Image (cartoon, rainbow, N blue to C red):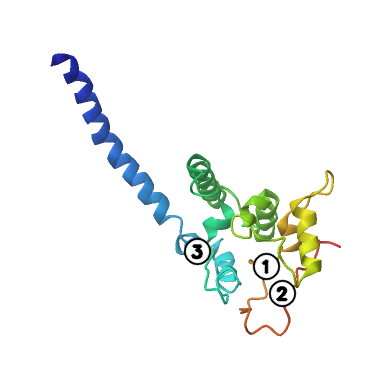
Amino acid sequence: MKKYLIPLVLVGIGIVIAFPLFSMSYYTMVRTSTPAFCASCHEIKPAVVAWRSSTHTNNAAGVVVDCMDCHLPAPQDTFDFFFAKSYHGVKDVVVHFLSGEYDREKAREAAYAAFNNDQCQKCHRNLLHMPTRRGAMLAHRAVVYARQGYEKKCVDCHYDLVHSERGLVMFRQTRSIPYQAKGLKGL
């Protein structure tokens, strides 16, 4: 009986300590993973306002894509998700308190540079089945199956889709023409 007492006590102490720590960590991550929390920072507020007027919030399907869906790894990749979220949160706080004026354009370029196509393809998985849009299908095929040296990112063409300065809600059902990507930036 004594042989099992010490391990049982240690397991009990571990549960008593670990459960509240895990619960607080999870609660904190959930509460800080909302657009409302992102908008509480005045540097990010214009990006949240632009997101609210985009088709990632206002669309015929009624699907809302939150900040975390695009800017962080998938939550099922638990370690990567927690690491990326913690890193970006600490980085944003440090930048807020230690740097001078917040350069929104520089931050936008850094965010686009950090994007990879997997972030977009978490939701946009069926890019190659567009029977009525051959040009779009071929453009997406060149990205999905890119030849070496010709790799592109989704945001190279769709850089103004979500965080646009135009501030207009473009509902799919009320647009007079379909959305067209601007093409490669700078060309």
Which image quarter holds the C terminus? bottom right
The residue carrying mark 3 is 39
Q: Quadrant of residue 166?
A: bottom right
- Mark found first going from the N terminus, 3 or 1: 3
Q: Quadrant of residue 55?
A: bottom right
* Alpha carbon separation for disc pair 2 and 1: 9 Å
Marks 3 and 1 close (CB-CB < 8 Å): no
- The amino acid at mark 3 is Ala
Residue at point 28% right, 41% down?
A: 20
- Mark found first going from the N terminus, 2 or 1: 1
Which SS class for mark 2? loop
* Alpha carbon separation for disc pair 2 and 3: 27 Å
Which SS class for mark 1? loop
Position above or below: 63 against 69:
below
The residue carrying mark 2 is 179
Of labels 2 and 1, the one closer to you: 2
- The amino acid at mark 1 is Leu
Q: Which dot marks residue 161?
A: 1
For the view shown, which residue lies furthest in the top direction?
Answer: 3
Percent x, y of residue 134:
80, 68
* Alpha carbon separation for disc pair 3 and 1: 19 Å
In front: 56, or 97?
56
- The amino acid at mark 2 is Tyr
Percent x, y of residue 182:
78, 68
State whether residue 46 appears in this view.
yes
Percent x, y of residue 121:
64, 55
For the view shown, which residue lies furthest in the left direction?
Answer: 1
